[in-house]
Image (cartoon, helix red, strand yellow):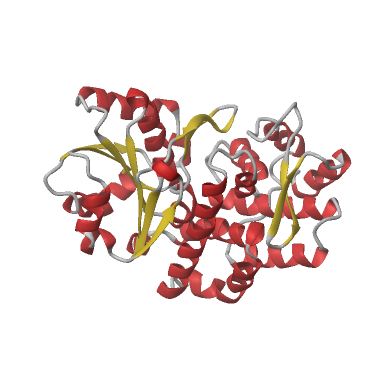
Amino acid sequence: MDILDVDLGARAYPILIGPRLLAREGAAIAARIPARDLLIVSNTTVAALHAPALGAALPGRRIVEVILPDGEIHKTLANVARILDVLVANRFGRDACVVALGGGVVGDMAGFAAACYQRGIAIAQVPTTLLAQVDSSVGGKTGVNHPGGKNLIGAFHQPIAVIADTSTLDTLPDRELRAGLAEVVKYGLICDRAFFDWLEGNIDALLARDAAALAHAIRRSCELKAQIVARDEHERGERAWLNFGHTFGHAIESATGYASWLHGEAVGAGMLVAASMSRACGMLASADVVRIERLLKRAGLPLDTRAIKADAAHELMRLDKKVQAGRIRLVLLRQIGEACVTAEYPDDALAATLAGHFG
């Protein structure tokens, strides 16, 4: 078991990474989740697979479960209200803990409910998808979607622990694994060129679920995110780099009603659009755009966004949380391994980029 620390002073917390943690590290898990009263939030797919093992790792507790429907389309205020209703009905106090067992959708909703209930109770994240293990479970971003846009309602609420049992990936569908790889690639693009180089050499092993390759990819992704979050918890500066591909990707998800693209798939396509925009602004070399596109294709990610109208994508981007004074700020690349956030770009470059990727 590897243990990384997210250094946030009094709110610091560990990330536990390793195989079969739920089965063989019960004492360590129990120590990290000390509350007597626990609300386990999961979905219909994950609960049947992993809730019994999680419960066995937390003996002697009062455990209540909330099982939500599976899918991004269900990441709504109505389902957060369901979680809150169960907390109230079971008279959970401020010393209780919510435990999120699942992917990013479950983690975001459970974390948001924990942030709201009695003005904030503990949340522990037990991510079971690659995307959640390398990204969404770390950093304290919580929230839900709104018909007007992605993740428009939420709060920062750091977990008390992240428990990434890599064995849960054994039951992850191939499509979900590929979607998670998009977020892994993102880390190499924004701040670690050597990691991007490593991914080019090991993407086939990752797709084949090679245990050593996956362990390295997860650990390095968590290390990079933990460092960024520790320096910029509330996204006032470099943490915005973590949104590389997301401004375009969220528009893809919103335009298609969260029904046809997984989040990681949309981020992957969005990263290619952002790379093209970086080239249009004279920052990123064409050869680097080719490398990025090639790796995303090798990861098996869908990149064709022409079914979405360029005007619709642009309008949805105006609701991005990085918009300031009415101007869309974009996360772009100066080179592979070096990101920046800017609102200083030619409008015709953005229009041309959108027209080149969208319908």
Can residue 262 be seen?
no
Residue in front for this viewpoint, 151 or 93: 93
Relative placement, left or right, of 142 versus 358 is: left
Q: Residue furthest left?
A: 60
x, y percentage for residue 265? Answer: 57, 52
In the rendered image, the quadrant that contains the C terminus is top right
Residue in front for this viewpoint, 39 or 295: 39
Q: Quadrant of residue 322?
A: top right
In the rendered image, the quadrant that contains the N terminus is bottom left
Tell me the residue at 75%/49% (across/down): 357
Can residue 216 be seen?
yes
Q: Quadrant of residue 71?
A: top left
Q: Residue furthest front?
A: 9
x, y percentage for residue 303? Answer: 66, 55
Tell me the residue at 47%/40% (across/down): 72
Q: Quadrant of residue 275?
A: bottom right
94 vs 335: above or below:
above
